[in-house]
Amino acid sequence: MNRSAYAAALLFASAAAATAPLRAQAPDPARLAALYDRHDCFTARDALKTAPPGASAGLAFYRGWVSAAFNQPARAASELRAYLASPAARADEKHRRAAEQLLADVLVREFRYGEAADAYARVAAATADSTREDMANNATLFAALRAVPAQTVAFAADVDVPLTRDRAGLMNVAVEAGGVKQDFVFDTGANLSTVMESVARELGFRIIDQRVSVGTATGARAQARLAVAPELRIGRATVRDVVFLVLPDSAMSFPQIGYRIRGIVGHPVIAGLGEVTLTRDGHLRAAAHASPVAAGAEPNLCLDGLDNLVRGEAGGEPLLLGLDTGAARTQLFPPYHRRNRAAVEAGQATTLRIGGAAGTQTLKAYSIGPVALTVGGATATLPQVSVSTEPSGARSDYADGDVGQDVITHFAEMTLDYRAMQLRFR
């Protein structure tokens, strides 16, 4: 579901003198391209604060991108449609395609699957590069869901349920469907929830016989079908009309270590719960009502498609990081290696094995440490971190790394608040 890297983004607007108020001024288009290409929604947001309202039709594109990133789908759709209706879009085919793809991503988050399918199809029809196949596949996937109602969540009370660890050390939560309970991996890094075919049938999911190609953690592709869970219970919360990717049992089994993943609770369900707290002593809590947020606290969590991105820092260097509760350890990616080649290669050369539904991938890497990583306003010192020198999926092309469970469990609690778009550690 990740968008391809189109050249468009935002500039840091020049700051006014410390004693003077900020003056409205339009960002430099050349710098806009660099920020969008880096998926840096945080710097983009800061830049737009000084942009005058209606400075140019092109700014609607960037405002739409940032609104989408900070989970304001209605505003994002309005701004993107305004851009698509403008002469600026008609004169710029590349940015018009990018706007259509952003709009499609927003529609997916709103569970408007048919409209999303139509938007992806328009992008595919206008694309001649390597992304055409991905866009056409997205169009096929969501067209198959055209008649599926939007996912909804109802709370009988706040949720407080135990988390368990499986053989691979991943966090699992009990879900119930059709009167049957199963432990599913709780994975913010999964764009869609996923389930074994045999488990989908056991839980009474409605299987849609449409084959689609999906990306995996290794960057490879796997063939899947789709299913809908009419009701999925997590503690006192009931999530209705949940979409699942259905994979063959063999694709989610790892016989070499006697392990299999029966199912994965992915981003749409997690974000649908609104505010989720994971505790080091093994609990998952979800608040039925929004928690008060400190006055003036800015969002430090954004969405790139359905990927969670956070601002981080290590050694005084700002980092753009994914947040992946399905990863046991934090990993840094090739963009970090390229900027810090000498320091990284002074570490221990090693290999890194990444597992996914399409098999495993072995990457060249270095082990460095200790690394003091600041994220969500808190710092965790990790004894060792692997830095891969080869890409392993779409996010590794632009992000500096992924925050894994070694950071999350460093703290007593981690809260993902999709209402306020905040990541908080305590």
Image: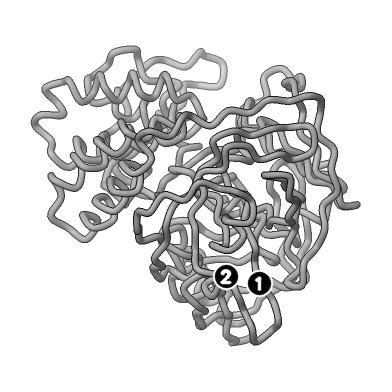
User: Which disc is residue 340 wearing?
Assistant: none
In the picture of the structure, the residue carrying the numbered disc 2 is: 252
**Camera sees residue 313:** no
Which quadrant would residue 354 be assigned to in this image?
bottom right
Q: Position of residue 107 (x, y in %)?
A: 38, 31
Q: In the rendered structure, are the residues bearing label 1 and label 2 in contact, judged by CB atoms less than 8 Å apart?
A: yes
Q: Residue at x 91, y 52 (%)?
A: 281
Report the side of 254 relative to 36 (left or right).
right
Q: Alpha-carbon neighbours of circle 2 within 10 Å: few (<14), some, or many (≥20)?
A: many
Q: Position of residue 332 (x, y in %)?
A: 57, 66
Q: Earlier in the sequence, mark 1 or mark 2?
A: 2
Q: Residue at x 57, y 53 (%)?
A: 189
Identity, as a three-letter code, of the amino acid under mark 2: Met
> Quick one: which residue is furthest to the left in this view?
91
Q: Is residue 133 above or below residue 29?
A: below
Residue toward you, 175 or 383: 175
**Camera sees residue 159:** yes
User: Which disc is residue 260 wearing?
Assistant: 1
Give the number of callouts.
2
Q: Is residue 38 above or below residue 285?
A: below
Q: Secondary structure at mark 1?
A: strand
Report the side of 299 relative to 60 (left or right).
right
